[in-house]
Amino acid sequence: MAFILVNPSAMTPEIERALKQYMVWFGSYKASGELKTTEVWSIVTAGCIEFITPSDTYKVTRVRRNPRVLCHLGSAQGPMITGTATILPEWREIWRIYWAYWKTHPFQMVLSVTPRIIRQTLMGRRVAIRVQPDEPNPLAGVTDPAP
């Protein structure tokens, strides 16, 4: 699957390979300053990394306290991008990302999108997180074709 590039010079081969994994190791900071990472499915939209998570997770709590985050693309050792995270509680944003997940992970989505997850989303118990990479943004102009 190819990515739509507005600024092809921003994409390195290492980043392009990592993005094809559709996985990000998302790192946020505890109150003590300790970095905690977790693996999440992700998409890239207009140069920003986006993913969905339950609203009561520690990563959401940590982003609310400190929006500075880092992401390793593709694997825990993949290219690192630092940025600022924003929590998006709007259900339209969440479903847009779910739709992109369906396009990139159809089999996994059949197994994982249960009535419970649909209920949680409709009841506001799931949020999207958008990471705006710092400048210079290596993902500038990159959009995953799935959304």
Image (spheres, rainbow, N blue to C red):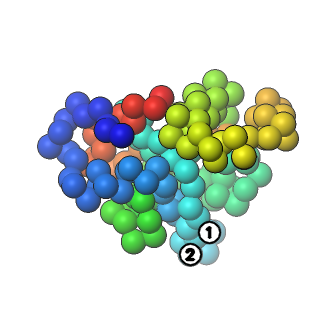
- The residue lying furthest to the front in this view is 107
Q: Is residue 77 above or below residue 116?
A: below
Is the residue under label 2 in contact with that under label 1 (CB below 8 Å)?
yes
Q: Residues within 10 Å of mark 1 (few under 14, many from 20)?
A: some
Task: Report how far apart the C-alphas of labels 1 and 2 lie in the structure.
Answer: 5 Å
Q: Residues within 10 Å of mark 2 (few under 14, many from 20)?
A: few
Q: Name the residue under label 1.
A: 30
The percent coordinates of residue 2 (x first, y second) are: 31, 38
The amino acid type, in three-letter code, at marker 2 is: Glu
The residue positioned 50% from the left and 62% from the top of the image is 25
Q: Is mark 1 on a helix, strand or loop?
A: loop
Q: In the visual, does 67 lie left or right of 95?
A: left
Q: Is residue 59 above or below residue 116?
A: below
Q: Mark 2 points at which residue?
A: 34
Q: In the visual, does 142 lie left or right of 129?
A: left
The percent coordinates of residue 74 (x first, y second) are: 42, 59
The residue positioned 36% from the left and 34% from the top of the image is 143
Q: In the visual, does 59 lie left or right of 57?
A: left
Rendered image quadrant of residue 29 = bottom right
The percent coordinates of residue 45 (x first, y second) are: 42, 35
Relative depth, front residue between 28 and 41: 41
Relative depth, front residue between 143 and 1: 1
Does any portion of residue 131 appear in the rendered image?
no
The amino acid type, in three-letter code, at marker 1 is: Lys
The percent coordinates of residue 112 (x first, y second) are: 72, 46
